[in-house]
Structures are given as C-alpha cells and as structure tokens.
Image: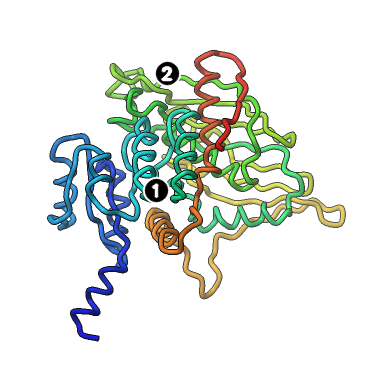
Amino acid sequence: MSDKKTAATAEKKKIKIGIIGTGGIAHAHMRPYVSFDDVEVVGACDIVPGKAREFLDKYDLQKAPAFENCKDLVKNVQMDGVSICTYNTTHAECTVAALEAGVHVLCEKPMSFTLAEAADMVKASRKSKKILTIGFQPRYDWMRRRVDEIIDSGALGKVYYIQSGGGRRRGIPGGTFVDKEKAGYGCLGDIGCYSIDQCLHAVHYPKPLTVSAIATDYFGKNPKYFSGADTFDVDDFSVALVRMEGDVTFVFKQSWAMHADSLGDTLWLGTEGAIKIASGFNEHNSPSRYMFYTDVNGMQIDSVLEQSVPWGVTPEKDVFAAKVRDFVDAIIKGGPAPIPGEEIIYNQAICDGIYRSSKLKKEVEIIMPKLD
C-alpha cells in the first residue's frame, strides 16, 4: 500500500470530535483530544461571538469551523462525539440536540439542573442509541478505585450509613459558577455532586426516597469573604439527610467557604466493617488517610489502606485525560457509556431534592421519572 493510501486509511479511522462550550473546562477536554493519534477535533461552538474561533485557533485548528449555536454545529459538521462544556443550565438542551443528531455525548457535571432535564437526556440517549456519559473524573483516581473495590467486595457487609466529608474553608469561584441563571446550583452543583458520586457509586446508587436539606449563602453574599457578593445568588453551603432504599441513610455536607478546616470525614458504615477517608488540612480537604475497620476473632482491627501502587502498575496521572480517553474508547467499541446517564440520574435526583427541600424548608419526596 502506498504512503498516500496508508495516510488516507489512518485518517478515516480517526474519531471526529466537537466541543460545545469553549470556556475554562473545555481546555481540560481539548488538551487530551489533540494529544490522541486517533482523534480529530472537527468543530466547536460557543454563544459568545468569536470565542469558539479563538479557542480552536489556540490549538492550531484553523480548518475546524466555529459556530455560535450547538444546533448549527451538530447539523453542519459530521462528528462521532461531542464534549458538552457549557454552563449547567444548558447541559440538557445541548446534550439532547447532539443525541438527536446521532452524536455520542460526554457531558460535564452536574448532569443537568433539574431531574426532569436529566430524564430527557437519558430518554434521548436511549432513543438515539448513542452514548451519554457524564464527566465525573474523580472515578479514575487510584485510591478512589481501591476503596470502591473493597466496598464492592462485600468486606463491609451491608452498608447502612454513608456520609460525605471535606469541604473548602475558602474556595468560592467566580463567573458563571455564582450566577443562578447559568449555574442553577452553587457549591452543590460544583463540588457537591462529586461528593454524592464518591459516596454512592461505591454502593451502586440506591434509589433515593426523601431529602431534608438546608442550603445557605452567608459567605458568598458577604463582601468580607467574596468580592462579587453583590451579584452572588447561589448556595455556598448545604447539608442534607437522604433516606434511600434498603434502609440506607446518606448524610451529605459540602461547602465553598466556612470557619473550619473540614466538615468531617467521608464514611461508609457496614455490618461487617467500615471505611473512613480522613480529610486533609488544605484548601480542598484532599484525603490524608484511608482507614478500614473490622473485627477479627473478637479483636477490633484498624487498618491503614496504603496509597502505594503495586509494582508494574501505572496509575492515572491525569484523571481528566482518562475520562476523555474512556469516552473515545467507548465510541470506538460501540459502548457502553463509561459513566452512564442512567446511573447519574440518581445523583441528579438527590441534587434536585436538596435544592427543592432547601427552598421549601421541609422534607421532600423524590419520585424518579419513567425513562421508557
């Protein structure tokens, strides 16, 4: 085969990717895409005039067209998949538009703003028979996966109580993160959904039944702590009690700002053992220690889970890149979705319930929508 034919064949095999929304998080998608030999970024869009063009040019993609509307992108450019990197309240409309056009979707977190929107996304994925995966890159963390494996092995017995931990002492972002019209949620949608996924993916997302929650904005609205206090209109702290199927209790806590170094540790309590992830003392309360507790022959055993990596194993150094690579591989293999919308809709149901309960100031019931 000639060099020209070989090059043409290789070009045909490339997965064609588009980017919808070209703000800050889009770069975390684009950098891996342009590094993959089997991927070609073929277009982008952003509602801000000229922004998508500037974004593409930054990565020397002058030939890739730029648009200001996601529907124009999916209509005019042949693509295998897209990354949805828009602000939260447009995740659903952009995702549905892409799926209806026959394009696989990697959507950034949170999945959407409302539970109804998340249901529309899953329905569109099922109808189109295209992948819908949600961008929870912490799942690719080495120790996170080890904890999931231990819990999944049954070593804890029946898990009956779960609590999230961590939280930021100071860490209120700006821009669209604190604009309710664009973000929908504040801290809850930014880092809270990560906490929910960490806690509940390990136990296969029991169905949530009720939520009783409180959300506050004491720090975001105070110019002493946040320079954009006059326009801040989302939550900076929330706490919730979630009752779940199988007599599982989930206590959720998350914060962008507070007068403490942590909201506590992440914890799974089971009938045969427990795991605790101790929060470290830094801005983002990164894990400092992983503990496993159980009884052996009548003795109470406390074990430290070593964060060392076995010989010959290379952990993911860039979890964002791993997330993007997994999406590309799923397209190549024809599925399944690495982090399926059918699973993350339970995460969205809890976020939706926390939001509604905090607004109504009472416990609310979670009714999962029919997806057929």
- The residue carrying pointer 2 sits among few (fewer than 14), some (14 to 19) or many (20 or more) residues within 10 Å by Cα, namely some
In the image, is 296 to the left or to the right of 90?
right
> Is 186 placed above or below 35 here?
above
- Give the total of numbered labels: 2
Mark 2 or 1 closer to N-term? 1
Structure colour scheme: rainbow
Q: Position of residue 84 (x, y in %)?
A: 34, 43
Residue at image location 78% in from the left, 44% down from the top: 271
- The kind of secondary structure element at disc 1 is strand
- Please name which of the two marks, 2 or 1, marks the residue nearer to the observer: 1
Q: Eyeballing the image, is 271 above or below 179?
A: below
The mark found on residue 106 in the picture is 1
Foreground of the two, 37 or 218: 37
The numbered dot on residue 51 is: none
Q: Are marks 2 and 1 in contact (CB under 8 Å)?
A: no
| Image vertical order of residue 317 relative to residue 344, above or below | below
Instruction: Categorize mark 1 by other alpha carbons within 10 Å: few (<14), some (14-19), many (20+).
Output: many
- Residue in the picture at 18% in, 47% down: 55
Q: In the picture provided, is 46 more to the left or to the right than 334?
A: left
Q: Secondary structure at mark 2?
A: loop
In the displayed structure image, the side of residue 103 where residue 291 appears, left or right: right
Residue at numbered disc 2: 218
Q: Amino acid at mark 1?
A: Leu
Residue 16 drawn above or below residue 74 = below
Instruction: Give the CA distance from mark 2 to mark 1.
Output: 34 Å
Image spot of residue 125 (x, y percent): 46, 44
